[in-house]
Image (cartoon, helix red, strand yellow):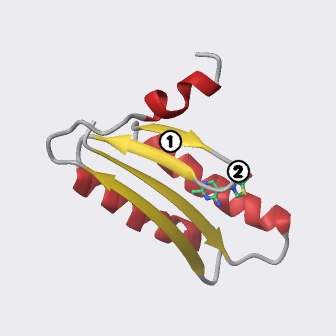
Amino acid sequence: MSASIAIQVLPQAGNDQELCQRVDQVIAYIQSTGLRYEVGPFETTIEGEDYDQLMDIAKQCQHVAIQAGAKSVSAYIKVVYQPEGDILTIDQKIGKYQGK
Ligand SMILES: Cc1ncc(C[n+]2csc(CCO)c2C)c(N)n1
């Protein structure tokens, strides 16, 4: 595995329900990419072999939040990248905590 990103998207919203609806649309977009991902209460982690693809997905998440009705959106993004492709995977990091 070459890269992983964790992205927290915070769309502007009038209440928690609106916030959740907008974050849900961002997560649906992430699901549609077909990459391995893990949703958490603060952020979603995505991993893949193509660093540029992951960065494009991170960018597109902002557009999806705006399309979902947010007037503005903040995002906090963490990145791990290793061109040789030997990073720890999501499963290697947290599988042991999920009873896998
Ligand atoms: C990309 C991204 N993934 C997860 C969260 C955390 N989060 C906030 S609200 C919510 C539930 C939506 O129904 C979740 C999972 C986030 N902020 N941004």
Residue sitting at the far bottom: 71
Crowding at mark 2 (Cα within 10 Å: few <14, some 14-19, many 20+): few
Query: Does the Cβ of the disc 2 residue fall within 8 Å of ligand 1?
Result: yes
Above or below residue 77? Residue 13 is: below
| Mark 1 vs 2, N-terminal side | 1
Q: Is residue 67 left or right of residue 51?
A: right
Residue 96 image offset from top left, x and y in percent: 57, 22
At 55% from the left and 50% from the top, the residue drawn is 44
Residue 73 image offset from top left, x and y in percent: 58, 77
Q: Tag on residue 68?
A: none
> In which quadrant will I find the C terminus?
top right
Q: Where is ligand 1, by quadrant? A: bottom right
Residue type, mark 2 in image: Pro
Instruction: Tell me the residue that label 2 is attached to.
Output: 41
Say what secondary structure mark 1 lies in: helix
Instruction: Tell me the residue that label 1 is attached to.
Output: 31
Residue 13 image offset from top left, x and y in percent: 75, 75
In this view of the protein, which residue sits in the foreground, 9 or 3? 3
Above or below residue 100? Residue 64 is: below
Residue sitting at the far left: 84
The answer to which image quadrant residue 22 occupies is bottom right
Measure the alpha-carbon separation of dots 1 and 2: 16 Å
At 49% from the left and 70% from the top, the residue drawn is 62
Q: Is residue 47 left or right of residue 70?
A: left
Crowding at mark 1 (Cα within 10 Å: few <14, some 14-19, many 20+): some
Residue type, mark 1 in image: Gln
At 30% from the left and 39% from the top, the residue drawn is 87
In this view of the protein, which residue sits in the foreground, 49 or 29? 49
Above or below residue 46? Residue 77 is: below
Q: Nearer the viewer, mark 1 or mark 2?
A: 2
**Count of numbered tags:** 2
Say what secondary structure mark 2 lies in: loop
